[in-house]
Image: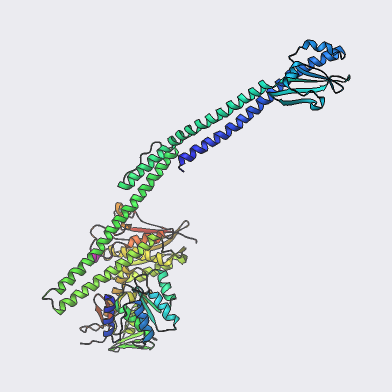
């Protein structure tokens, strides 16, 4: 069932219940007041006859002048002694045993009669007086009819009104749905117009737009990544193919073929390595690679990394130094953090000219453990500091294959740090590059 | 099948006798009817799944070593393979030299490893004293260089890949790019220290494959 139909039915049902309660209340109140009016009429008739009886001292001849119209019957010690034509015509009982004392409503052939029956005084006379309740019945019937009809009409109107109202309220949602379908079918670049950013629908549209923007960003990143990855994979593949084909050409001797096979193996190794890295990144993205945090002394970990990479710095006559005054412990995945730090330090070694200096400093700032890698290289221009963490990004001029990796090192470093709740960024530096990793520290 | 043929050729050249089974059923039949020293089992087999074959073999009480080859390398896959009764696990693509090394380890073939002295030509490495002598003169090596030389000597005459070095000498730090450079630098320094001028290096680079320490054979 559509939301519109449900809203309409609920709306009508609630209104119907309210109307029924209201109508019931009105009916009961009107009936009670009508009955009171009827009983007052009954009392005045009864009292008139009774008072005449009392004044005359039981002389029933004085009540002749009440005429034939009023309906009453007079008993003496239970025996009927006088009844009017009105009583007779009404078809009301003529035996005292058939009447109840007090106020009663009696049904006769052609309607209802309100009857009051009781002793007039101690003389033994009892009087039963009746008034026709037909008008009262009719009034109640009419009221009931009006109420039921009114409720029915109101319910129908409520259905129609609710339907219209729900339609009006839901129309923007249908519009949003239609537009959104258009947008996603064409491209993710379009956004939905926001009519009123303050109301519920405006907020919904704003949220949808934000979701679209994120989707578009993710798609764009994926597209770029796929393009870059295929480019990176295509280059070694192309080399393998052409080297293989050339080796099979007539005139190639054994030495040439050996040479060709060697290049093919080298390219294959490069491909494998790239594939491994891409798979690792894909696993990070899919969230299947879970960090395994444990208490780690970051100073010791940084020391290991410095020791391991020291030979590379030595080859370039660079000074690679560790600046750690005291142990700084943090709960991190040592493998992941090590990987991140190795990639950053390796990067620093690669981009710092010979004779330069690379410092790895471990310290604590507030509640955070901080790893700073600074170098005396050319640094990174401010507008590239964020870009360098993108996959396959390489600074201008360093897109040579001998320059090293495929441009995934920093992307992996960023993931590895982010996976354990840390941050990594290149900061402003007077000279060279300054990369800072911040992690939650516990002492 | 290309891979199987290449492996057969390579292994036969190394002196192994090799039978190739094209399907899981065939492999199971061969493994249960003939005697083998070792099975190299590809998990992606036509017909019967490699793990099934392995389970069936183990159920029959076959205890021969099984080395699994697979293209899947998540931790779960690894655990599944080893739980299924495999003795070792190699992820495609792998270097043939690495396969050889694993096969040697599983069949306990190849050079003996538990000796104090490892020697090649006139180079002697003392594993207890942690000393290296070349032509009677001591050579001062760093700890890493010593480990590297020891590993090469333990696999003398066999190609050692960078992956093997990264895994066994550097405890497999996951980032291959920087580590490759580190390995290269250490190797270059090791060469400088143990080689004698104007003589060919004891440590040979097999381009595209890896390194090998071997006596100079013409």
The quadrant holding residue A55 is: top right
Q: Position of residue A21 (x, y in %)?
A: 61, 32
Q: Residue at x 24, y 78 (%)?
A: B206
In the image, residue A344 above or below residue A9 = below
Q: Quadrant of the N terminus of chain B?
A: bottom left
Q: Is there any visible trace of residue A89 in the rendered image?
A: yes
Relative depth, front residue between A437 and A96: A96
Q: Position of residue A212 (x, y in %)?
A: 36, 47
In the image, residue B27 above or below residue A436 = below
Relative depth, front residue between A229 and A330: A229
Q: Position of residue B38 (x, y in %)?
A: 36, 83
**Residue A402 falls inside the magenta stretch:** yes
Relative depth, front residue between A350 and A396: A396
In the image, residue B12 above or below residue A285 = below
Residue at the outermost left position: A251
- Counting the numbered discs, the total is 0
């Amino acid at each position: 069932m559509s939301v519109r139909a449900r809203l309409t039915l609920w709306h009508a049902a609630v209104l119907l219940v309210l109307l029924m309660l209201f109508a019931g209340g009105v009916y009961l109140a009107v009936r009670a007041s009508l009955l009171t009016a009827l009983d007052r009429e009954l009392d005045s008739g009864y009292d008139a006859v009774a008072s005449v009886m009392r004044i005359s001292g039981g002389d029933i001849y004085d009540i002749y002048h009440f005429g034939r119209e009023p309906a009453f019957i007079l008993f003496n010690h239970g025996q009927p002694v006088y009844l009017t034509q009105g009583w007779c015509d009404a078809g009301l009982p003529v035996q005292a045993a058939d009447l109840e004392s007090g106020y009663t409503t009696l049904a006769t052939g052609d309607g209802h009669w309100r009857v009051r029956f009781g002793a007039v005084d101690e003389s033994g006379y009892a009087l039963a007086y009746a008034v026709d309740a037909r008008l009262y019945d009719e009034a109640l019937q009419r009221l009931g009819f009006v109420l039921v009809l009114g409720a029915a009409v109101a319910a129908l109107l409520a259905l129609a009104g609710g339907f219209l109202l729900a339609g009006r309220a839901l129309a923007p949602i249908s519009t949003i749905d239609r537009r959104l379908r258009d947008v996603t079918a064409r491209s993710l670049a379009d956004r939905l117009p926001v009519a009123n950013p303050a109301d519920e629908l405006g907020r919904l549209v704003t949220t949808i737009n934000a979701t679209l923007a994120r989707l578009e960003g993710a798609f764009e990143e994926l597209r770029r990544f796929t393009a870059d990855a295929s480019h990176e994979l295509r280059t070694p593949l192309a080399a393998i193919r052409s080297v293989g084909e050339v080796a099979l050409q007539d005139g190639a001797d054994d030495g040439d073929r050996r040479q060709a096979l060697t290049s093919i193996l080298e390219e294959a190794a490069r491909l494998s390595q790239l594939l491994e890295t891409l798979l690792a990144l894909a696993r990070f993205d899919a969230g299947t690679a879970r960090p395994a945090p444990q208490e780690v002394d970051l100073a010791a970990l940084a020391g290991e990394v410095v020791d391991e990479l020291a030979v590379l710095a030595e080859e370039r006559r660079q000074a690679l130094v560790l600046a750690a005054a005291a142990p700084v412990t943090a709960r991190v995945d040592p493998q992941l953090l090590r990987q991140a730090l190795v990639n950053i330090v390796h990067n620093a070694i690669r981009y710092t000219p010979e004779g330069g200096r690379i410092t790895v400093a471990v310290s604590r700032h507030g509640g955070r453990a901080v790893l700073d890698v600074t170098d005396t290289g050319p640094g990174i221009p401010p507008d590239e500091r964020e870009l360098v963490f993108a996959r396959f990004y390489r600074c201008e001029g360093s897109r040579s294959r001998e320059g090293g990796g495929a441009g995934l090192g920093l992307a992996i470093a960023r993931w590895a740090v982010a996976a354990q709740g840390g941050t990594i960024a290149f900061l402003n530096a007077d000279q060279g590059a300054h990369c800072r990793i911040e992690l939650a520290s516990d002492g | 099948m290309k891979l199987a043929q290449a492996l057969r050729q390579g292994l036969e050249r190394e002196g192994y006798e090799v039978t190739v089974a094209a399907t899981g059923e065939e492999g199971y039949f061969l493994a249960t009817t003939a005697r083998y020293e070792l099975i190299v089992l590809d998990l992606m087999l036509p017909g019967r799944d490699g793990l099934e074959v392995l389970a069936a073999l183990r159920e029959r009480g076959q205890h021969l070593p099984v080395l699994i080859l697979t293209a899947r390398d998540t931790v779960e896959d690894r655990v599944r393979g080893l739980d299924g009764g495999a003795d070792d696990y190699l992820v495609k693509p792998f270097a043939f030299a690495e396969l050889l090394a694993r096969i040697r380890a599983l069949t306990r073939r190849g050079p003996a490893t538990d000796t104090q002295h490892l020697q090649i030509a006139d180079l002697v490495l003392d594993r207890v004293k942690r000393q290296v002598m070349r032509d009677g003169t001591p050579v001062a090596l760093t700890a890493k260089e010593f480990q590297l030389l020891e590993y090469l000597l333990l696999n003398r005459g066999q190609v050692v890949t960078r992956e093997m070095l990264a895994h066994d000498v550097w405890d497999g730090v996951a980032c291959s790019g920087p580590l490759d450079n580190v390995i290269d630098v250490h190797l270059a320094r090791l060469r400088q220290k143990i080689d004698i001028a104007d003589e060919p290096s004891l440590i040979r680079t097999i381009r595209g494959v890896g390194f090998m320490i071997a006596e100079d054979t013409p």
